[in-house]
């Protein structure tokens, strides 16, 4: 269960329109996706260092073999597993993968292409990670690209034009502890703390329909919060609540 997700929803109501495409502002010196992995500050278990010169992260199981040095990074492992789970869609996955976000707590918007011709775009992942930071503490954590792939495939199935309204994404340990102190059922260790979970709505789509599509994907965890009208998806094991 993901009770802390419900706490984050608060009294935020569905926004009428989130179709604007203003990029979110970046605050201070951006910390790159790669540098954060390299420094190991993000609880990524001392992931092996990718080649710093490598600007793109290759998608797909076959490509992953060729980039075996990257395989110990949890994000890549998650992506390849998600990519396998989404195999039918992957055939259409060449080309551009784009997403639109509106963060309900910060008011920031982002329209971004995060993968192109089967490769992730690190700068775009950085922008997304910034938008999906802990909105309470401001802490930024790399978002698992597999989470983005789930969002991308769901959006495609729903017509490909909606904006994701973000209720919550990354949560720092301090934020999680604070939420735990407010609700006894909050998990000690949430996938939100690893950048592998996100709570969203999709504009123009009933959340229960989004849930049905997410359940069919079988790409990870799916939690439905009808009272607050949002869906939790993550790249953990397949489970439902
Ligand atoms: Zn959640």
Image (spheres, rainbow, N blue to C red):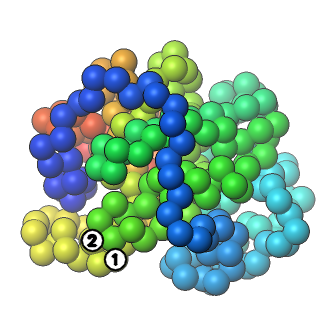
Q: Using the image, determine if residue 115 lies above or below residue 205.
A: below
Instruction: Name the one closer to the observer, 64 or 24.
Output: 24
**At x 84% / y 49%, what residue is drawn?**
62
Specify whether residue 191 is in view: no
Label 2 C-beta lies within 8 Å of the nearest ligand 1 atom = no
Query: Is 72 left or right of 82, judged from the image as shown?
Result: right
**At x 33% / y 71%, what residue is drawn?**
137
The crowding category of the residue bearing disc 2, from other C-alpha atoms within 10 Å (few below 14, some 14 to 19, many at least 20), is: many
**At x 21% / y 59%, what residue is drawn?**
4
Tag shown at residue 59: none
Instruction: Name the one closer to the observer, 79 or 128.
Output: 128
**At x 45% / y 40%, what residue is drawn?**
109
Disc 2, SS: helix
Label 1 C-beta lies within 8 Å of the nearest ligand 1 atom = no
Query: Is 100 left or right of 104, judged from the image as shown?
Result: right
Instruction: Name the one closer to the observer, 115 or 60.
Output: 115
Disc 1, SS: helix
Residue receiving disc 2: 176
Is the C-beta separation of discs 2 and 1 under 8 Å? yes
Query: Is 66 left or right of 45, judged from the image as shown?
Result: right
Residue receiving disc 1: 173
How many angstroms separate mark 2 from mark 1 (CA)? 5 Å
Q: How many marks?
A: 2
């Amino acid at each position: 269960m993901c009770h802390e997700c419900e706490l984050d929803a608060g009294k935020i109501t569905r926004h009428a329109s989130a179709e604007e495409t203003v990029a979110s502002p970046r605050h201070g010196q951006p910390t790159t996706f790669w540098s954060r992995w390299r420094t190991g500050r993000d609880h990524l278990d001392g992931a092996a260092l990718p080649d710093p010169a490598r600007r793109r992260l290759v998608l797909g199981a076959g490509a992953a073999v060729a980039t075996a040095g990257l395989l110990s990074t949890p994000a890549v492992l998650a992506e390849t597993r998600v990519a396998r789970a989404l195999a039918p869609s992957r055939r259409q996955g060449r080309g551009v993968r784009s997403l639109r976000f509106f963060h309900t707590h910060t008011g920031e918007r982002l329209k971004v292409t995060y993968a192109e011709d089967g490769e992730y775009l690190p700068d775009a992942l950085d922008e997304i990670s910034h938008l999906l930071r802990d909105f309470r503490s401001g802490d930024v954590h790399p978002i698992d690209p597999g989470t983005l792939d789930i969002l991308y495939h769901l959006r495609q199935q729903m017509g490909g034009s909606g904006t994701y309204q973000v209720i919550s994404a990354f949560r720092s340990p301090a934020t999680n502890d604070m939420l735990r102190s407010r609700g006894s059922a909050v998990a000690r260790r949430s996938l939100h703390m690893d950048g592998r979970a996100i709570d969203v709505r999709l504009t123009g789509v009933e959340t229960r329909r989004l849930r049905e599509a997410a359940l069919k994907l079988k790409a990870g965890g799916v939690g439905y919060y009808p009272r607050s009208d949002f869906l939790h998806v993550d790249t953990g094991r397949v489970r439902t609540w």
